[in-house]
Image (cartoon, rainbow, N blue to C red):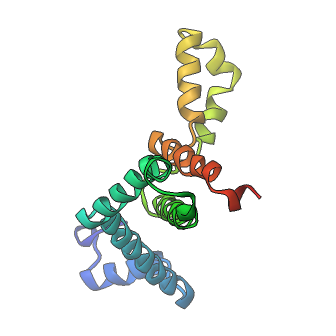
Amino acid sequence: MPNAEEGLTHHEEDIEEELFVPKKSPNESSKTGTDDAIAIAKEIVNRAIDSNAGITFMSFVTTYALYGDDVRIIAFDPGADGTFLVLSSLAFVFFLVEFCLLCWCRERYLQRPDFAAMRELLTADRWRGRTSTFDWMGEFGKALQAGSFYFWLDLVSTFSMAIEIPWILR
């Protein structure tokens, strides 16, 4: 775009720039407002999960999930099973909510496979140009990766609790 040195005044430059900048419709401006609100909400949830109170609370829930059933068997009579079932159900719900919130707000926690990189890796030119099959397989594995390590760890640990809760298995 020509500038003032090439014969346009600042006013003409502004008019010309207005002609080339697409105008936002009212729906688009509300979408950015909605996007901003979602980004703010995600940041608030991230801070709550990473706060000292959030970490301490989930640490207590984790400790209960690891040792609660053993404590129930060793120290309590069978009449307390209902209470421990409620506590285990609450722990499962807390883990499930945390898992869902992390999927929603944490960057690269629930990452999708890179289909563009996979498509490029599966071309005949790329296959012929590879230096080693193992390197190619490593690149393909990275492109195929779905979810981070912590995503899979949280998924397996959360749903492993379902085995201990009878109403989920029914």
Can residue 164 be spotted in the picture? yes
Residue drawn at x 53%, y 82% as measured from the top left: 28
Residue drawn at x 32%, y 69% as measured from the top left: 48
User: Quadrant of the image for the N terminus?
Assistant: bottom left
In the picture provided, is 56 more to the left or to the right than 167? left
How many tags in the picture?
0
Image-quadrant location for residue 145: top right
User: Quadrant of the image for the C terminus?
Assistant: bottom right
Residue nearest the observer in this picture, 48 or 42:
48
In the picture provided, is 8 more to the left or to the right than 45? left
Above or below, 10 against 43 in this view is below
Above or below, 118 against 40 in this view is above
In the picture provided, is 41 more to the left or to the right than 160? left
Q: Position of residue 148 (x, y in %)?
A: 48, 42
In the picture provided, is 18 more to the left or to the right than 129? left
Q: Residue furthest bottom?
A: 26
Q: Position of residue 49 (x, y in %)?
A: 35, 63
Above or below, 83 against 156 in this view is below
Q: Residue furthest front?
A: 77
Can residue 108 be spotted in the picture? no
